[in-house]
Amino acid sequence: KNPAAANRTAELLQYMEQCSTCAPDLFSYNTHLHALSIHAKRPGYAQQAYDVLQEMERRSQAGETHLQPNLFSYNLVIDAWSKADDYDAAWNAVKILRNLIGKERPRPDTFSFNQVLSALSRSTRTGAAQLA
């Protein structure tokens, strides 16, 4: 569980993007999200996970449907925010959950809700309980 693993997965994804025979797929991106989530207590890692998720959504909407985030993708980013030592972490986790609730697919599961509850319970933000 070395924090450098998240940096290495980012490097490998960049390499794969340039490779004509080994383009990254959903599994590749979820692996990177997982590495970021594991180390999300480190400053900026949860935000990086969120940025990757947004890029996956953007590219999927632009026609790269094989990069459409699945529930595991969203849960990894919610999990990252639930671990992050960031004033807005709980709010960011709630935003992702609300986004999932408003979608046809994927639908949030118990893990999605539990991680948001965890983020809210750790939050130092005034009114965190009312965010849900």
Image: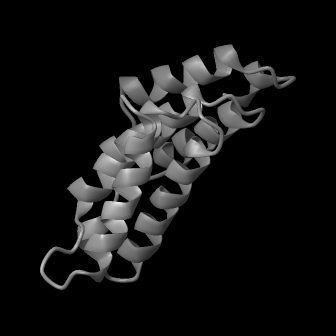
Residue at 12%, 80% in the rendered image: 21
The residue depicted at 36 percent of the width and 47 percent of the height is: 73
Q: Residue furthest top?
A: 121
> Total of numbered circles in the picture?
0
The residue at the far left in this view is 21
What is the quadrant of residue 60 in the picture? bottom left
For the question of whether residue 119 can be seen, the reply is yes
Q: Work out whether residue 95 or residue 31 is closer to the camera in this orientation and state it.
A: 31
In this rendering, position of residue 43 left or right of residue 8: right
Residue at left offset 82%, top offset 25%:
125
Which quadrant holds residue 43? top right
| Along the viewing direction, whichever of 86 and 116 lies nearer the viewer | 86
Along the line of sight, which residue is nearer the eye, 8 or 31? 8
Q: Name the spot of residue 84 as percent of width and height, x first.
A: 62, 31
Task: Say if 6 sits above or below 112 in the image.
Answer: below
Instruction: Locate the N terminus by quadrant.
Output: top left
Residue 106, can we see it?
no
Identify the residue at horizontal 55%, vertical 52% (top origin): 48
